[in-house]
Structures are given as structure tokens and as C-alpha cells.
Image (tube, rainbow, N blue to C red):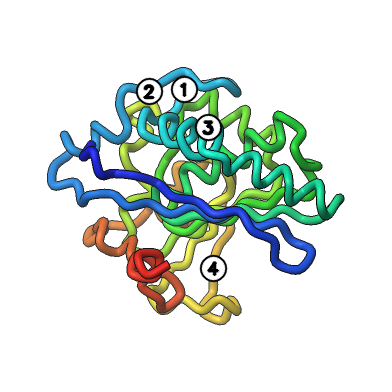
Amino acid sequence: MDEKDAISGQADKVGNITLLHFSADISEPQTFDDFKKLFFPLKDWQHEGKVSRFLKESFGKLWRRGGMRKRFQEIVEEQKNQEVLITGHSFGGGLAALVALDIVKEELADKDKVTLITLGQSMVGDEDFAKAYEQQVEHSFRVVRRGDSIPHVPGKEHKYEYNGKEVFYETEEMQSNGSTGFKICKPHSDSEDDGCSGQQENPVRAINNDEYFGRNVTAGLERE
């Protein structure tokens, strides 16, 4: 992992919604060894299971010690009983999943008011983490577009497990109104037999992680 690799986040309020957003600034891995630095070794996490070393470190630095958790609590206290929407892209989506579980487990917000929606989210942790996650974060959706490889690395063969429901768009021409069609897949699905993203064949590339719903998400995040 390059020393410049980092995940950023923002807490804000939009109407009656508390919004948390996470994005990643990751130097592009050239080999699987580069990916290994992001995903291995799996580390014990405070809310059950093991998770990516990089995501655990980012969770502690940004959410726990960086003031974002405190800012979130201040917003929730100001506007009680409002909805909480957590979003993120790629590795930022992975961190968003950790934050969603922390919010529910620590009872920082009512679990039925917490929703996670991520784009091209990386895998986060092992099977124990995924099971604990499913029990707590009930409204969780990983949007995955055709051709994107990031949601499948490093893979179940490396003791990682999917978390949340996958929302798979089979066409690259994604429309947010659903007109291009999508499929909601079962939690923990390896997606190989149910018509979801795991059944894709090459070309499946990391570069396809950049664009969602007709927008270069990575470029958009870099401008913010």
C-alpha cells in the first residue's frame, strides 16, 4: 500500500437525512501483490470477524479518531429520528460498510433508519464479519455494474465474503431510474448461478470501476 493511499469522508445533513459519504484515493495496483497490501493480512475487528487491514486502519483513523463519528453524533442529536444514508465508492464503499455496522452496533442511530448504498464496493472481510453484518445492517445494497472487477477482489478463495445485497446492472448503460434493468441478488451469493455479477466472463477490469450511471465517479470524487 502506497503511503499516499487514503480514504476520505464527509458527514452532512440534507433535509431530514443524515448523509455520510466515503471515497478512496488509491494508487492503482499493478499486480496482485499490490492488491495484497490492501487486503492482507485480515485483521480482527471490534464488531466480530476479520476485515481488510487497510479498511480497519482507515476506519480507526477517519471515523473513530478523525472526528467524523463525533460530527455524525452531533447531527443526529440535532435532528432526532431522521434517516441515515451511508454511501461510498470502491474502497470507500468498503469503509462505508464498516461504519454502517458500527453505527448500528453502537446504537448511534435506529437500525431501521440506517441504509447503505455503495457503488463498485470492494470486499470487506471474512464470513464471520459478513454474517454479523447481515444480522445488523438490514438495508444494505451494493450496486455493481457489468464489467467491474473490484467488487470481486480478492475473492472468496482468499477467505473473504460478500456483504449486503448486490444490485447488478447487466448493461453498461446504467440508468438510475431503473429503465435499463437490474437484478437484486441474495446476500452471501457468489453470484455464479443466479445471473448476477459473478457469472461474467472477461473482459472484467478494474478500470470499469470508474464509471457508474454515466458518470466518471472517480473523477467526480477527485474534484470534490
Disc 1 marks which residue? 50
Residue 191 point in image, percent of width and height: 45, 48
Residue beneath disc 3: 65
Q: Residue at x 33, y 50 (%)?
A: 150
Q: Amino acid at mark 2?
A: Leu
Three-letter code, disc 4: Phe
Q: Nearer the viewer, mark 4 or mark 2?
A: 2
In contact (CB < 8 Å): disc 2 and disc 1? yes
* First reached walking from the N terminus: tag 4 or tag 2: 2
Q: Can see residue 198?
A: no
**Residue closer to the observer: 120 or 25:** 25
Q: Residues within 10 Å of mark 4 (few under 14, many from 20)?
A: some
Identify the mark nearer the N-term, 2 or 1.
2
How far, Cα to Cα, is label 3 from label 2?
21 Å
Picture coordinates of residue 100, whole percent (x, y): 62, 41
Q: Nearer the viewer, residue 116 or 81?
A: 81
Viewer-side label of 1, 3? 3
Tell me the distance, in whole angstroms, between the alpha carbons under discs 4 and 3: 38 Å
Give the image quarter of residue 61: top left
Amino acid type for the residue under numbered disc 1: Lys
Position above or below: 173 against 38: below
What's the CA distance linking mark 2 and mark 1? 6 Å
How packed mark 1 is, by other alpha carbons closer than 10 Å (few <14, some 14-19, many 20 or more), is many
Task: Give whichever of discs 4 and 3 has the lower sequence position.
Answer: 3
Helix, strand or loop at label 3? It is loop
Residue 191 placement, left or right of 78? left
Badge 3 or badge 2: first in the primary sequence: 2
Q: Decide: marks 4, 2 in contact (CB < 8 A)? A: no
Q: Which residue is mark 2?
A: 42
